Amino acid sequence: KEIPSMPDCYHVSTDQAVKEAEEVFGLGIPSVMVFGLPPSKDPMGTGAYAENGIVQESVAAIKKALPDLVVITDVCLCEYTDHGHCGIVKERNGQLDVDNDATLELLALQAVSHARAGSDVIAPSGMMDGMVKAIRHGLDGQGFEHLPILSYAIKYASAFYGPFRDAVDSAPQFGDRRTYQMDPANGREALRELHLDVQEGADIVMVKPALSFLDVIRQARESHPEIPLAAYNVSGEYAMVKAAAANGWLDERRIVEEILTSIKRAGADMIVTYFAKDVAHW
C-alpha cells in the first residue's frame, strides 16, 4: 500500500518485507531499518514488545531468508501507542505528560524482543533520558551483550517528520514532542545529549534530521571522532524532493546525489535514506 505523502514508499506485509529485503540486498545495500505498524494500538504500546509483534515476526523472516543482511530495528513506542507519544503517558497536576522513567522498562523489553527475533542492531529513537543505559542493561541481562546500540542521540523536534507520522499514524493526540525531542535552535545541547549516550554505552550515534542540521553532524563528528556517526535523511526531506521532481522543477538524480554527498561531507559515516534503492540503481 503506497504511502500518499512518500511516493514509491509502501507499507508491506511480512512476506512482502522479505521480498523487499531480497531486492535491497541484491542491489548491494548492506542494511535495512525496520519499523512496525501494529493491527491495533493501546496506551501502553504493547504491540511494541509482543513476541509475536509485526516487527518481531518480520525480522525473523528476513533473517531466515537473508542471514547476511544487517537488520536494524527501531525501538520506540510512538508507532504502537494510541496517543502517539514515544512513552507512557501519565497525569501530573491535571495535565497529561510522558513519564520518562516508566517508559525505560518497556523500551528494554522491546529491545530484548527484537534481539530474540534476530535483530543485528538495536536503534532506540524515542529520546527518553537514560534509554541507552536501560536498553544496554536489558540486553546484557538476557545474553545479548554482543548486540550494538545505534542511538538516535541527537533528534530534533522537526517539521520534517510529517510524512513519516502519516505513514505510521503516530501524530500525537495531544501536545507535541518538544518535551523530549530537541529545540532546532539549540546546537550546544546536541553535544551534551551525544556525550551522555556515549557514556551510557551507545556504539553508534545518529543525528536526525540530516539536511537542516549539517552543522550539528559536523560538530558531532569533531567532538567524538572515535564513534561511528549516522544521519537520517528523513521523510520530509524525501517528500519535498519527490514533489518538486514530479513537477519538473528540479533534476531528481542530481539533487539527491548532492544532498547525500553533503551529509557525507559533513561527517556522517552512514546515511539512512528512502533514496537508497534509487541511488543503488543509478
Image (cartoon, grey):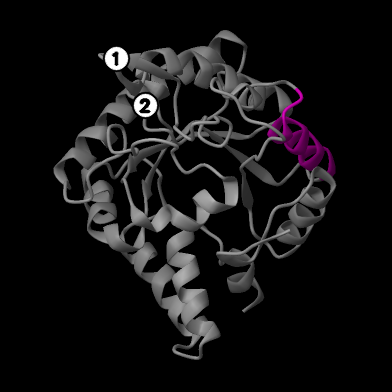
Q: Is residue 60 magenta?
A: yes
Task: Determine which residue is flagged by label 2.
Answer: 128
**Residue at the image position 25 percent from the left and 14 percent from the top:** 93
Up the image or down, 65 lies above or below 174; here it is below
Q: Amino acid at mark 2?
A: Met
Viewer-side label of 2, 1: 1
* 276 displayed left or right of 221: right
Name, please, the residue furthest toward the front.
Answer: 94
Up the image or down, 147 lies above or below 90; here it is below
* 208 displayed left or right of 252: left
Residue range in magenta is: 52-65
Quarter of the image with the N terminus is bottom right
Secondary structure of the residue carrying numbered label 2: loop
Numbered tag placed on residue 238 in the rendering: none
The answer to which of 72 and 96 lies nearer the viewer is 96
Up the image or down, 219 lies above or below 200; here it is below
Numbered tag placed on residue 92 in the rendering: 1
Q: Position of residue 217 (x, y in %)?
A: 29, 53
Residue 172 visible in the displayed image: yes
Residue 182, image quadrant: top left
Q: Main secondary structure of the magenta part?
A: helix
